[in-house]
Image: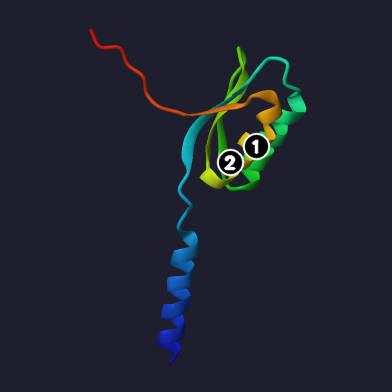
Amino acid sequence: MKIAILSLLALVGATMAVELPQKSVIVSYPNETPDSIIEQAKNAIKEAGGMITHEYKIIKGFAAKAPPKILESVQVWGNDYHALIEEDAMVSINN
């Protein structure tokens, strides 16, 4: 009986340790977007278990790894400010 309980606890622990799939994205906003909107988006991503991987200085935006569900919310919050969420990817030029 003890072995069955320990096995079950180990299985539950392993299941909970599995991370939700995250997407690498770049989130950008027009220059007139209030900083509070950008901070709200970054905080929501962090609270959802994501992380901000880079904050841009030239444009209003940031790169992040985040669960797709929170990215939907960030998109909705940014609709009034025309937020753009793009998948982050490597780009190369071939001759």
Q: How is the image coloured?
A: rainbow
Give the alpha-carbon distance from disc 2 to disc 1, as whole Å: 6 Å
Which residue is at 40% across, 27% downward? 89
State the residue position of label 1: 76
Residues 6 and 15: in front is 15
Q: Is residue 32 left or right of residue 19?
A: right
Residues 19 and 31: in front is 31
Q: Residue furthest bottom?
A: 1
Q: Residue furthest top?
A: 95
Whether residue 6 can be seen here: yes
Instruction: Give above or below for 35 relative to 40.
Output: above
Q: Is residue 41 left or right of residue 12?
A: right
Instruction: Give above or below for 4 relative to 48.
Output: below
State the residue position of label 2: 72
**Residue 75 pos. (x, y %):** 61, 35
**Residue 1 pos. (x, y %):** 43, 92
- The quadrant the C terminus occupies is top left
Whether residue 67 can be seen here: no
Q: Is residue 27 left or right of residue 35?
A: left
Circles 2, 1 touching at the beta carbon (< 8 Å): yes
